[in-house]
Image (cartoon, grey):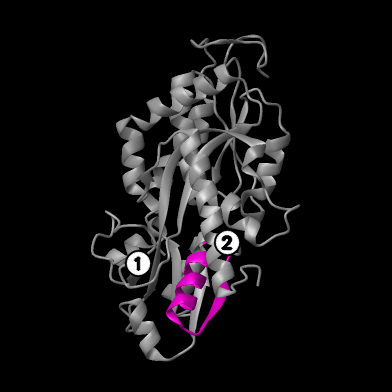
Amino acid sequence: MPTSRTTPRRVLMGVVGAAAALALTACGGVKTTSSGGGEGKYPTGNIEFSVGASAGGSTDLITRALAQGMSKELGVSTPVLNKPGANGALNAKELQSAKADGYKIAVQNASLFTITPLTVSPEEATKIDSFDVITGISRDDYVMATNSQSGFTSIGDMKKSGKTIRYGTTGVGTGAQLASALTFKSAGIDATAVPFDGGAPALTALLGNQVDVSTMQIGEAIENIKAGKLVPLAVFSDKRIDYLPDVKTAKEQGFDVLVTQYRFLTAPKGTPEDVKARLLDAAKKTFATDEYKKFNEQNSLTPMEVSPQEVLTALQQDTAKYKKQLDEFGISLAG
């Protein structure tokens, strides 16, 4: 089925190969003797970007676009390796144990640190203080949509139907699951979760009427919304989304549900300040390119190119808010 990922995916299919083909050149920077590429000006060797998700998803595409731009700025190859599992936790654990020299970095998802910990024991939870945040990257908003044949046009319509709503999510411990669960509880709608392993299968199930509604990232649903195959019921941002300006937020419809997915660039804890500064500079220059701006637009991504402290503050606030709401409604995301 078509999604908004199609065009960007074709554009980015050759990112890794193109980056790998770059000649390893001397590149201006700051002195450091901690680099895995040898002594000298960082970087002196390839910088590995790891992705805690399968190829083709939002995090993968964002990582490849960022790696491609930073490769040009840093003058070294930036191979991207996919290491999926446990909503990014497996990749995070590996990165956490890597040498803190700037040669292994990763784009990570907010949900791993704000929502997944609400589904596992404290010992199993991934902690943001195990990493250094380099910069914020972008926000990926959620939309709840239904098949055009359902007759629903709002959250209120589902409540009026009096039926048990089958809702698809993109997995346990995800923003899609949280946004859906909070919406149905606060609206007093009887609903049953049907978890899928990612946005693609959730979208397929919704198009095939296997579920009544599904909450997905906007980029995963927008082409089918524009084609009239799906009807958007709500977005979960603090204000309406530019990509879907006519769709009301859940809050506008009377339900205090604010859930977004955002991503940020991380390195192992203890990475030298000069190395982090070099990475940040390359990221900022990439953000400023027309190519990267176009990538964001193609994938319905909202820039969130903020400081590490702003990322950490957002993570802390969201974790506290989500936990409070789940406790209030007696919701268990672990099922």
Is 187 included in the stretch rendered in magenta? yes
Q: For mark 2, what is the residue? A: 323
User: For the residues marked 2 and 1, what is the alpha-carbon distance in whole angstroms?
Assistant: 19 Å
Give above or below for 201 relative to 73: below
> Dot 2: what SS?
helix
Residue 87 horizontal side relative to residue 236, left or right: right
Mark identifier at residue 10: none
Q: Observer-nearest residue: 16 or 139?
A: 139
Amino acid on which the number 2 mark rests in the picture: Lys
The x, y position of residue 312, in whole percent, is 53, 41
Q: Which residue is mark 1?
A: 251
The mark nearer the N terminus, 2 or 1, is 1
Q: In this picture, is 87 found above or below 266?
A: below
On screen, residue 111 versus residue 152, left or right, reads: right
In the image, residue 210 lies at what x, y percent? 49, 80
Q: Which image quadrant: the N terminus?
A: bottom left
Residue 237 in view (yes/no) = yes
Residues in magenta, as a range: 177-198
Task: State left or right for residue 2 relative to residue 67.
Answer: left
Secondary structure under tag 1 reads loop
Q: Residue at x 46, y 83 (%)?
A: 189
The residue carrying pointer 2 sits among few (fewer than 14), some (14 to 19) or many (20 or more) residues within 10 Å by Cα, namely: some
Q: From this viewpoint, which residue is outermost toward the bottom?
A: 162
Image x and y of residue 30, in percent: 54, 11
Magenta-colored stretch includes residue 241: no
Residue at horizontal 42 percent and vertical 36 percent from the top? 306
Residue drawn at x 33%, y 61% as measured from the top left = 223
Q: Amino acid at mark 1?
A: Lys
Task: Determine the image quadrant of residue 237.
Answer: bottom left
Q: Is residue 13 visible?
A: no
